[in-house]
Image: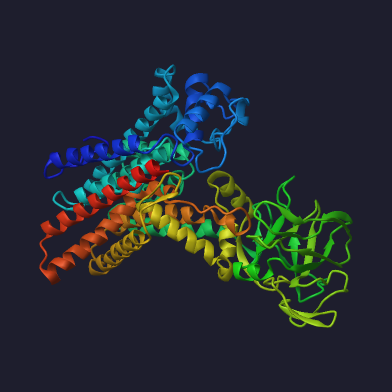
Amino acid sequence: MPLFPLPKLASKLTFWLILLAGLIHGLLYVFIVPPWQHYDEPGHFEYAWLIANHRSLSASTPADTDLRRQMAASMMEHDFFAELGFHPNLLLTGKDISIGISQTDDSPLYYALVAIPLWLTRHSEITFQLYLGRLVSLALYLLTLATAFGVTAELTPPTHPLRWLVPATLALMPGFTDSMTAVNNDAGATAALSLFLWAGVCAIRRGFSLRRLAAMLASTALCATMKSTSAIALLLAPIPLCFSLLSGQRRRLAWILLGLSASGLLAISLRSGGVASWYPSPYTSPCQSTSEQAPLGQHVFHLASTAPNQPAQLAQPIPSAQARLLAGKTVTFGAWLWASEAATACLPAIYTTEISQASCLPIPVTPEPVFHAISITVPADSSLLRVALLAPQTDAFYDGLVLIEGDFAARGTPSFSTPDGSHGEWDGEPFTNYLRNASAERSWLTIWPAMDALISRLAYIQLAIGMTSLSDLPATSWYYRSTGAALLRTFWGRFGWGHVSLPGGKPYRLLGSVTLIGLAGLLSLAWRRRRSLPWVWIALLLSMTTLCWGAALMRGNHSLIGTVFIPPARYAYPAMIATLLLLTAGWLEIGRLAQRWCRIPLQASALLYILAFLALDILSLATIIAYYRLR
């Protein structure tokens, strides 16, 4: 029996027809999307070209001036810089020639694959080589489609419609096809995690064997070395491993082991002592502590770094509605500050734009609390207002923070009327503090700093910020709304660098409704078949979907205290087979309900389903062509 058995469809013709449809659909995106018009495509291509021509996988490989000059010229030829308002200077050298963000610090596996055809055609024109790189991604796209057949064949009986619905939907999704035909390591991550899913469901269904164990280990290693978005396989691997070893009645033991493992991981990851509404850097230890020196209440902010040469920092964003009220006005920011020993510290800073610091003055601090205050005028056009507590090289303590409108810096110290510092008087004038939890009285769970730093370095996700955001929804809801909308739109189809949208806003409302219908159908199916569903497989599918989409949702949460970044759905595409398997199962359930209530034949529903996706594909391709033709 083969390691990954080919799907035994009612007709193998279906398998090949869907692969052919995927090939045609993919080729359209390869050649219709203009050169370089995918997320970070210039940087990804550069890394593959450097491997092909310098025979080195090292991230320290220096930039190739001639390559960058050729790429910049090609980008100018294809109007890449038309909307950016500048053109690169081709007379510069090395990385001074602007082609976008370098990707040479990424894992080299995907780029080594792309480098193979680039080395064979290394004397060809640079744009031609780019298209060859896209064809490598197209091959990974087709591999993912074939893997979808394998996964559904393991999970469903031979005549089940999901066997063709899932791979057909995958082949017709415009946003997914667009991303999977770009020179981008997202294609490699998606193919790798798809193979892991196939190996996992094979192991669960067929039981333990050395070959299936080898397949699990190989696919997990592939995911771990491909990209951070597919490295999530390291967390998922225990599920198929346990259920393949413990079959039959022993699966209860597998559930217990997995439950205890998940609980243990949470126990060693979570810490008490975080401060509600305040966002720590990855190297900042839990910040709330009790102190007899506290000028206000019983608790103080205690900042200490957990790594050398990594300063501890806490920050709080001001909700946008309040920040707009303060634009163009003078504000005063003050706090009691002291340290475990005499040192020089930075006065708590006020940031008024995404990239510049408005106030951060060095001041002497002693072991005794001293109140410091500063007044600044917030720029009228400021898009961001936040405050930050910055620790010196020794332990630092803050309490009684205050941010109010007006110039009070030289008017003594404020008198608070509440222990949390929300109200008080300053020089006889009553005030309402714009800072939340200003004296660290409210605590919150946080992440163990070493764990947060490790995940931040490997997966670019700051879990401590995500945890804190749950205690601060009035100030953070904008990020989750914006990111949720972006994930939905790019999941279905938003092209280029995420700036080419389907015409009007209504297509995304309709597609959002379709997504919700699928989720509603999935819940209906789960309830109707709650006693007979294969919950082991569903645990793997739901875990993969939840972790990948959750990580995508959290990937830009540093936007809450820094430069805004709204992540697209490509960061969750590695879980695309699992996602669509769940969604199409929900849509199929709705189709069956429609057949029962409205007497709509399943054949007619299937035809309408395919026609709807074809209409979306035609609209998507027409949108791309029109956008770049009319620029």
Q: Position of residue 127 (x, y in %)?
A: 42, 27
* Front residue of this view, candidates 346 and 126: 126
Does 272 sit above or below residue 215?
Answer: below
Identify the image quadrant of the N terminus: top left
Q: How many marks on residues? A: 0
The figure's colour scheme reads rainbow
Does 560 sit above or below residue 234?
Answer: below
- Residue at 58% across, 48% down: 456
* Front residue of this view, candidates 546 and 317: 317
The residue furthest top is 123
In the image: residue 515, left or right of residue 229: left
- Residue at 39% across, 55% down: 489
| Image quadrant in which you'd find residue 417 | bottom right
The residue furthest front is 630
Q: Position of residue 393 (x, y in %)?
A: 80, 51
* Front residue of this view, candidates 272 and 242: 272
- Residue at 68% across, 60% down: 315
Q: Position of residue 223 (x, y in %)?
A: 43, 40
Does 109 sit above or below residue 532?
Answer: above
Identify the image quadrant of the C terminus: top left
Does 615 sit above or below residue 27?
Answer: below
Can residue 90 be seen from the camera position used here?
yes
In the image: residue 604, left or right of residue 349: left
Can residue 244 be seen from the camera position used here?
no
* Front residue of this view, candidates 280 and 198: 280
Q: Position of residue 402 (x, y in %)?
A: 76, 71
